[in-house]
Image: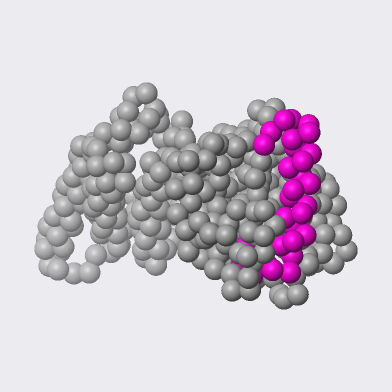
Amino acid sequence: MSFATAPLAFQDNVAPLDVTIVMPCLNEATSLPHCIANAQLALVEIKRRFDLEGEILIADNGSVDGSQDIAGRLGARVVAVSNKGYGAAIIGGAAGAFGRFLIIGDADGSYDFTDGVAMIEALLGGADLCMGSRFQGGIAPGAMPWKNRYIGNPILTGVLNLLFRSRVDDAHCGLRAITRESFLDLQLNGQGMEFASEMVVKASLRKLRIVQTPATLSVDLRDRPPHLRPWRDGWRHLRYLVMLSPTLAFGVPAAAAISVAIAILVVALLHYAGAIPGAGPFGASWTIIAGFMLSAGHFAALMAVVAHVAGVREGYRRLRPSISRLGLLLKLETMLGLGAMFLAIAMAMLAAIGWQWRAGNFAAPASVLPIVLAGVIGAIGLQTIFGGFMIAIIGGHSADFVRARGQLA
């Protein structure tokens, strides 16, 4: 039995199939016989119910325990995936799959691949992605650590639903089905366990139709510790969710910082103009802090736009209507003009401050507010200029970032 090292070579001389069951594998010699036999039962049922032909593909990630030989003897096709990681193995396996529908499941014996029959029915009914739900199907005693079941999974799934409106109750179920076309369109690239979240997030951003069916979880058959590291992989999932959400990573901090800074500076200006008598609530220290917050908030807002444009450019999210409506403003020439205007205002303010300082025999000014405002306005001007070039580069080296029809240039 020879094993594939270049998966796409198979596709030149093998007729496409309907269903491929993809199992990522790293040293699963103990559980593979059970998993392959179970997957074969699933394919028999899929053939009986829907008249679809299928195959079993083992995406081997460098096993050294003979998993490849076992899989080959039991009738599965083996694809060697050199890039390490759970996500890398699935991506490599999907690249070598012949089926137009993919069922993805772990090779540790914890999932029942016959649950995938209902998933194929969902895909045939028009769904793009069908997620298994262990909370609907049932979790055997000892099959899931308590911290995963009651802390990690609910928190991460809740954050995912909050940020991306995915409407799933088990975002990290290891049994799922997806159309091959959708898998390729999502341009998935997560190499590790964060791949599980990436698929759901990008499917939500692309407005794919996501459904759920029950999936059972049993105690795995391995005689070694699992590859999953709850705290490490949980953090990788969480940071990945944040990185895929420019609103959370940049937009919310930007709005908060700008709002607080403007409130402080408005009060400080009113006091400086004499509208607020007495000492006033904000002195020099608060004024300087507000200036820093305004500059940082403006920078974060620019990064939110940059990150969003990058996601649209890479094809895993659609352009937000709010960004689309800024099409006239989001042009390189417009941002360069705005930046130059802010810089000119800052220079004029600094010149006036310098003239007053000289007229006062170079005595220390009574308030730091004018010079803080001049510095912040100048910083915002430079950030706007640099941000304009950055968005132009990320947006495809085009000065017209967003066209009138609401698409990237």
Q: Which residues are magenta?
A: 25-53
Please tell me whether the stretch drawn in magenta is mainly helix, strand or loop. Answer: helix
Residue lying at the far top of the rendered structure: 405
Is residue 36 on the magenta stretch? yes
Quick check: 53 left or right of 375? right
Residue shown at 34% from the left, 24% from the top: 404
Residue shown at 45% from the left, 54% from the top: 6
- Between residues 399 and 68, which one lies in front from this camera angle? 68
- Between residues 255 and 143, which one lies in front from this camera angle? 143
Residue shown at 65% from the left, 28% from the top: 126
Please state the horizontal and vertical placement of residue 368, each as a whole percent of the image. 30, 62
Please state the horizontal and vertical placement of residue 24, each as a whole percent of the image. 61, 58
Please state the total of marks drawn on the protein image: 0
Residue shown at 47% from the left, 35% from the top: 318
| In the depicted structure, whether residue 224 falls above or below residue 113 | below
For residue 38, say whether it is visible: yes
Quarter of the C terminus within the rendering: top left
- Between residues 351 and 131, which one lies in front from this camera angle? 131
Quick check: 220 left or right of 262? right
Please state the horizontal and vertical placement of residue 34, each as a whole percent of the image. 77, 60
Residue 51, picture quadrant: top right
Is residue 326 on the magenta stretch? no
- Between residues 370 and 9, which one lies in front from this camera angle? 9
Residue lying at the far bottom of the rendered structure: 224
